[in-house]
Amino acid sequence: MKPESSNIQHITTEVRRLIAQSRQNVALAVNASMSLLYWQIGQRINQEVLQVKRAEYGKYVISSISKQLMAEFGGSFSEKNLRRMVQFATVFPDEQIVVSLIRQLSWTHILALIPITDPLKRAFYIQICIHENWSVRTFRERINSMLYERTAISKKPEQTITNDLDLLRSEHQLSPDLVFRDPYVLDFLGLSETYSEKDLEASIIVELQRFIVEMGTDFAYCIFCSILTPFW
């Protein structure tokens, strides 16, 4: 007795899902292992360089190690990449934080974070990126567009920023300050000092539309629900 074609299709769909999930798990594991390795390499080089405390010695160490590693393991260990690993270990010296980070962000995401010197700004981008599941391309676009500076949270006291980010990390809740931008950044809105109220309203509407897209699906859904609530 042959099984029904619909049953076969159902089984095939389920098997496809299992294969895709397994591949995803493998990719995540490989990324985490690779990123941790890069951090460990950066930390070890840092330890050696800090013992001598000479910039020239640091360049020599990285150059020498790179030549040997590239000959054996390929271009991933170029001088440029080794410097990135050193930066990674410098920016994130705590291994526990690194272990948590690499489970959620790819190495390419981490490379986009390294140049950010402000710890709170960096924490903001980490949590928003994880919450919205941004691609690397989107992540870089948000950083380059100065999203952090354009949110109300950037004007708040340090402890307030920390508390809001902790809330997002632990309970996945976006506070209003993490979402809404400062409407008085006239340069960003493209307005001169002598703007009309109509110009301000139009600029804010345009920026609000763009911002809803930037902040992702969760925020857009909240806005949608708030609009429809009076009619339910």
Image: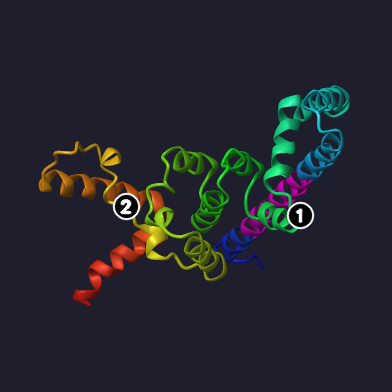
Q: Is residue 71 magenta?
A: no
- Where is residue 107 drawn, in percent x and y? 66, 42
**Main SS of residues in magenta:** helix
Residue under the point 30% across and 69% down: 225
Q: Is residue 27 magenta?
A: yes
Local SS, label 2: loop
- The amino acid type found where label 2 is placed reads Asp
From the image, tell me which residue sits under label 1. Answer: 95
Task: Give, as a three-letter code, the residue at label 1.
Answer: Glu
Residue 60, relative to residue 49: is it above or below?
A: above
Viewer-nearest residue: 229 or 82: 82
In percent of width and height, residue 195 lies at: 14, 41
Residue range highlighted in magenta: 15-36
SS label for mark 1: helix
- Locate the N terminus and report the quarter of the image it occupies: bottom right
Residue shown at 55% from the left, 66% from the top: 166
Relative vertical location of residue 122 with respect to residue 115 in this rendering, above or below: below
Q: Measuring 21% from the left and 38% from the top, which residue is drawn there?
A: 191
**How far apart are the alpha carbons under marks 2 and 1?**
35 Å
The percent coordinates of residue 51 (x first, y second) are: 86, 37
184 horizontally vs 70: left or right:
left
Residue at point 88% right, 27% down? 72
> Please, which residue is most extreme toward the bottom here?
232
Quadrant where the C terminus is found in the figure: bottom left
Q: Position of residue 31 (x, y in %)?
A: 71, 46
